[in-house]
């Protein structure tokens, strides 16, 4: 493994905080059998994906044997990860603890991993109550407000004040490329009705059909759930526009790989 190739993407905000480690893996031409892919479902090679997870986890600074990953199904369930779940779903032949597109935990040294290839990896940290979240938000999860559901789960389970949450919205297909059918923007306008005209910030029409800006939509729902706008960082990277560095379902087809958002609580040494 050529470690110099590995350069996980980091959030400026999360990088400035104590008590948390995070990173987003990317597409690296020539790495492993599928450009550094960490997705292990068919038609991807599960053993290669596991080797890539090991390499990426070393670059991020977490133990791959302790990764927790849930089944992602484009819905809005939030699963509370406990210390005893460490390692579940880390590789293809270890069972996942649940089917849920969002995971939250207060357990230290348990890395949460979420996979994407155009969908949005959303990572969150509450430095006060000490809790984290890793969320997979495609358009379906977005219009089911998985972002807000995750914030509310942190409130309920951890006593989190949403005003304390730091949120990082990683690379995803952008409003530039995410042309959608009318059912998508209709569903968005319905879930976001309380936002009034602000909901239109997540819809553009650069050509004939409307485009849905998934990161903007999730940022709006985070704000609606009480997260401060200055605590929300959007990567601004479109996976389709930047397909040489990111896996893109739209850009490269359904068989393409997956990159991962990873976040882990660490002990604070005072
Ligand atoms: Zn784009």
Image (cartoon, helix red, strand yellow):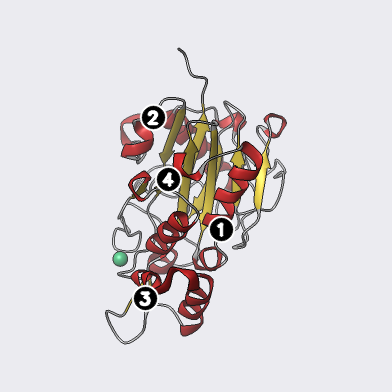
Location of mark 1 (residue): 146
Cα distance in 3D space between marks 1 and 2: 24 Å
Q: Earlier in the sequence, mark 2 or mark 4?
A: 2
Residue where numbered disc 3 is placed: 211
Residue depth check, mark 3 versus mark 2: number of the one nearer the observer? 2
Lateral position of residue 29 relative to residue 39, left or right: left
Instruction: Report how far apart the C-alphas of labels 2 and 4 lie in the structure.
Output: 12 Å
Of callouts 1 and 2, which one flags the residue occurring earlier in the amino acid sequence? 2
Q: Are marks 1 and 4 in contact (CB under 8 Å)?
A: no
Image quadrant assignment for residue 4: top left
Secondary structure under the numbered disc 4 in the rendered image: strand
Q: Is residue 165 left or right of residue 99?
A: left
The local crowd at label 4, few if under 14, some if 14 to 19, many if 20 or more residues have their Cα within 10 Å, is many
Report which residue position mark 2 lands on: 17
For discs 4 and 3, the disc positioned in front in the rendered view:
4
Q: Residue at x 35, y 32 (%)?
A: 15
Judge whether 220 appears above or below 234 on screen: below
Left/right of residue 77 with respect to residue 223 in the rendered view: right
Q: Quadrant of the N terminus?
A: top left
Helix, strand or loop for disc 3: strand
Q: Residue at x 69, y 43 (%)?
A: 93
Question: How many marks on residues?
Answer: 4
Q: Earlier in the sequence, mark 3 or mark 2?
A: 2
- Tag 3 near tag 1, CB within 8 Å: no
Q: Which residue corresponds to the image point at 48% horizontal and 55% vertical from the top-left?
A: 116
């Amino acid at each position: 493994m050529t470690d110099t190739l590995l350069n996980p993407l980091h959030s400026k905000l999360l990088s400035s905080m104590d008590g948390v480690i995070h990173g987003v893996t990317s597409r690296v031409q020539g790495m492993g059998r599928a450009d550094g892919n960490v997705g292990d479902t068919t038609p991807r090679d599960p053993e290669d994906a596991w080797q890539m997870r090991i390499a990426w986890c070393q670059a991020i600074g977490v133990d791959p044997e302790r990764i927790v990953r849930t089944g992602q199904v484009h819905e809005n369930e939030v699963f509370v990860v406990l210390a005893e779940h460490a390692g579940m779903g880390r590789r293809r032949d270890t069972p996942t603890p649940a089917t849920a597109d969002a995971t939250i935990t207060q357990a230290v040294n348990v890395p949460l991993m979420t996979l994407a290839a155009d969908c949005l990896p959303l990572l969150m940290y509450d430095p006060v109550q000490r809790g984290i979240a890793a969320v997979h938000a495609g358009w379906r999860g977005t219009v089911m407000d998985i972002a807000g559901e995750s914030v509310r789960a942190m409130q309920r389970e951890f006593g989190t004040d949403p005003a304390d949450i730091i949120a990082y919205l990683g690379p995803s297909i952008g409003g530039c490329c995410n042309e959608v059918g009318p059912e998508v923007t209709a569903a968005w306008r319905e879930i976001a009705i309380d936002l009034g005209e602000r909901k239109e910030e997540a819809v553009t029409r650069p050509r004939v059909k409307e485009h849905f800006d998934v990161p903007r939509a999730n940022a709006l729902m985070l704000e609606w759930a009480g997260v401060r706008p200055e605590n929300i960082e959007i990567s601004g990277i479109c996976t389709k526009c930047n397909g040489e560095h990111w896996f893109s379902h739209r850009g490269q087809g359904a068989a393409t790989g997956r990159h991962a958002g990873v976040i882990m609580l660490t002990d604070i040494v005072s």
